[in-house]
Image (cartoon, rainbow, N blue to C red):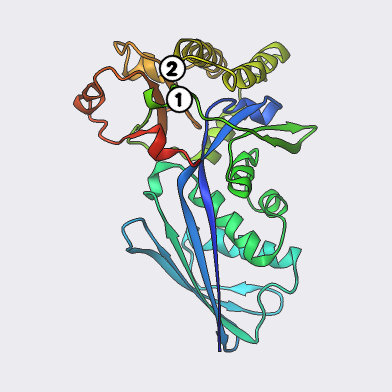
Amino acid sequence: MTNSQIFFSPGKLMLTGEYLVLDGALSLAIPTQQGQSLKVNKVNGHGNLHWRAFNYKGDVWFETIFEILPSVINTVSEDSKVILLKKILENARALNPDFLNQTNNYIVETHLDFPNQWGLGSSSTLLTNIAHWAKVDPLSLFKISMEGSGYDIAVAIEAKPLLYELVNGKPQWKCIEFEPAFSQELYFVYLEKKQISSNEIAAYKLLNKPSKDIIERVSEISKELTNAHDLKAFDLLLNEHEILISTILKTETIKQKLFADYKGCIKSLGAWGGDFAMISGTQNLNYFITKGYNTIIPWEKMVKK
C-alpha cells in the first residue's frame, strides 16, 4: 500500500524592515515564484523514514535515514542539516503525537526550485511543508525549532505579499495587493554571497536597540511603499530606508560599498552583505555583469502573483 501527499511553499524576499522587524517594525515581504516541494510516500513497514533532498538541478544534495522510535527519531548522522531536520520532525511530533508512527515506513523527497545559496527560504519552506504534513501550526513549529521573526513562515503560509510585525512578540500580518505599476523597472541581483541569517541576527542583537522614532519611520516607509505611484517616490523611500538601517548597523549600504557609481536605487534585502539586492531603473544592466554579478532576475520572473 502506498499513500502519497505533496506539499509546496513559496520562497520569500523581505523588502523593508530587515533586522528592525525583531524590534516591532512593520515589514513588507513578498513571495517568490520559486519555492520548495515535499513529497511523502507512506508504505507498509516498521518505522523507517528515508529522506532525500534534491537541488534545483535535480541532483540529490543530501540523503539520510531516520528510525522512528516511540520517544525519539533516531539517526546516526552528525551532519548539521540532518540534526536540524531531526529537530523539526521531533518538534512536529511533539505538537501532534499522531504524526509519524512505527507501523509505517516513509519515503520523503524535497525539491528546491532555486539554488540553495540564494537565501530565498530553503529552511522556512521546508519547515512550513513539514508543518502542513504534520497538521500543526507552522508558526508554533517555527517558534520551537528556529530563531527569527517568523515573517518568512507567514509568507510561505499565505503565498501573498504581506505587511508583518511582532506585537508584544506575537506575529501579526495583513495580506495585501502589491504589484507596482513600474515593476518592469525592478530587478533582483544576486550578490554571490550567502548570508547565515542566524549569525546576522545574533550580531544585530549585540548593537544598541534602535530608537522608537526609527522603528516608527521604518514602519511608515513599509506602508508608504505600497502606495508609491511612481518609481521616483519608490526610490526615495528605499534610499531613506537604506540610510536608516546603515546608521543602525554602522556599516555602508550595499550601494556605497559595491555600486557607488550606479545611478539608480539599490536596496539590500534580508541580511545585509549577501543574498539579493533589488535595483531600480533599466540603465545598462551590463553594469552589474561587468562587476561579476551575473544573476539578474526581473520582478515578473521572481515575484509570485
- Within-10-Å neighbours for mark 1: few <14, some 14–19, many 20+: many
Work out whether residue 289 or residue 302 is closer to the camera in this orientation and state it.
Answer: 302
Instruction: Measuring from the top left, give residue 181's x and y in whole percent.
Output: 47, 23
Q: What residue sits 70% from the left and 52% below the top?
A: 144
Q: Mark 2 sits on what residue?
A: 253
Between circles 2 and 1, the one closer to the viewer is 1
Instruction: Measuring from the top left, give residue 280's x and y in whole percent.
Output: 39, 20
Q: Is residue 194 visible?
A: no
Q: Going by the image, does 280 lie left or right of 211?
A: left
User: In the rendered structure, which amino acid carries the disc numbered 2?
Assistant: Thr
Quadrant where the N terminus lies? Answer: bottom right
Q: Going by the image, does 44 lie left or right of 267?
A: right
Q: What residue sits 75% from the left and 71% below the top?
A: 97
- 2 or 1: tag closer to the N-terminus: 2
176 versus 109 height, above or below: above
The span from disc 2 to disc 1 (Cα, nearest Å) is 8 Å
Q: Mark 1 sits on what residue?
A: 268
Give the residue furthest to the left. Answer: 290
Disc 2 and disc 1 in contact, CB within 8 angstroms = yes
User: In the rendered structure, which amino acid carries the disc numbered 1?
Assistant: Ser
